[in-house]
Amino acid sequence: MSLSKLIGAVLKKEKVSIFIYLFSCLSIMLFYYFLYNGKFMLYPVLLCFFCLMVYLIYKLCVYNSFYESLKEIRTSPSFNLDKDSNFEEVFNEIRTIHNDYISKIYALENNYEEKEKLLIQWIHNMKTSVAVINLAIDKLPNEDAAKDIRNENSLLQNNLEGVLNIFRLGEFSKDYVPEAINLKKLVKESINLQKRNFIYSNVFPEVNIPEDYFILSDKKWSKYVIEQVISNAIKYSFSGGKVCFYTEENDYEITLYIQDSGVGIKKEELSRVFEAFFTGRNGRREEKSTGIGLYMSKNICDNLNNKIEITSEVSKGTTVSITYLKQEKPFTHVRLGK
C-alpha cells in the first residue's frame, strides 16, 4: 500500500481517537489561556502537536505491518506472525479459517477425483458393450434394421467418447503432443470417420486444400475438432448438399474453412453457439443435438492456441473457420507430460 493510502486509512480508522485528542488539547489550551492571560500558549500547542505526531507515526507503523501481513495471507495460508503483533487474535482466527477451507477443498477434490475415476471406468465398460453390439449387428439378417442399429450405436459411441474427452480436458497437458500435421491429410481422415453420416444424409464433401500445407498442433485433438464441425455441417445440411473445405494462409498462420449450405444459424444465436448445452432453434428440431460438440471444440482450440469462429446466414449455410499456427517443415514430435 502506498504511503498516501496508508495515511488516509489511518486517519479514517482513527478519526474518533483523533477528535477526542484534539478536543482534550483544546481544553488544555483554554485552561492555559485563562490561567496565564494568553501567555505561554506556545508550549501546550507544541506539546499537543508533538504527541499527536508520535501517536500517528506509531499507528502508521502498526497498520503498515497489518496490511503487509494481509498481503502475505492472500498469497499463502502458511503466513508468519510476529510474536508482538497487535492483531495476533485476528490472524490466528484467519489461519483457522484458512486451514478449515483448505481441508474442505482437499476433501472435495478427493471426492471429485474418486467419482471421476468411477465414471470413466463405467464409460469404458459401456464402450465394450458398444463393441459387442457392433459384432452382433453383423449377424442380423435384416439389413435395414442392422443399418438403423448401427447408426444409433455409432452415435452412442461418439457420445461416450465425447464424455471421456471432457474429462481429458482437465489434464490437457498430459495428453498433448505437438507435431507438424499435413492439413489435407488430417481433413480427409476426419471425413472418412464421418463417411457413414455423409452417405446416410446424402451430403458430399468437397476438399480444396493444397497438398503442402502443414500446421503445428496436436493431431488427435485437432481431428476431434474437425470431426465435430463436420458432424454439425452434415446434420444441418439439406439432402444433396455439399460441405466444402478450403484454406487461406499468411506468413504465420493457416485458416481452414468448413462451409455448408444448410439451414444456417439465426444472428441472435451466433454469440451463444460455443456455450455448453446450447442447441438453439436448429438443435431443438434435431433430437440428437446435445450442445456439447462446439463447446468442446472451443475449449480444445483455446488449449491448442487455435482460433475457431463461426459465421452464418439463415437458409444459406454456415462457415466455421479454424486458424492454426503454420509449420513450414515437418519435425519429430515431443510428448509433453507423462
Image: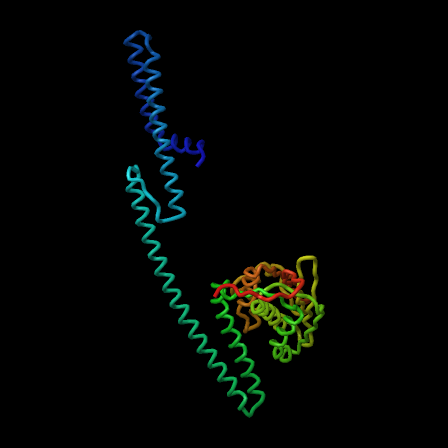
Q: Quadrant of residue 142?
A: bottom right
- Towards the viewer: 269 or 138: 138
The residue closer to the viewer here, 277 or 336, is 336
Left or right of residue 16: residue 326? right
Q: How is the image coloured?
A: rainbow
**On the image, which quarter does residue 43 sit in?**
top left
**Residue placed furthest toward the front:** 332
Residue 9 placement (x, y as % from top left): 40, 33
The residue drawn where x is 54% and y is 88% is 138
| Residue 325, image x, y percentages | 63, 60
Q: Quadrant of residue 191?
A: bottom right
The reply to whether residue 282 is in sight is no
Q: Position of residue 277 (x, y in %)?
A: 52, 65
Q: Judge from the rendering whether residue 290 lies leftward or rightward of residue 80; answer left or right.
A: right
Quadrant including the N terminus:
top left
In the image, is residue 108 above or below residue 220? Answer: above
Query: For this view, does 20 lie left or right of residue 238?
Result: left
Residue, x 53% and y 69% (percent of image)? 290
Identify whether 94 is placed above or below 318.
Answer: above
Instruction: Where is residue 334? Give x, y as percent.
Output: 55, 65
Residue in view at x 48 percent, y 84 percent: 132
Residue at the bottom extreme? 141
Residue 265 visible within the image: yes
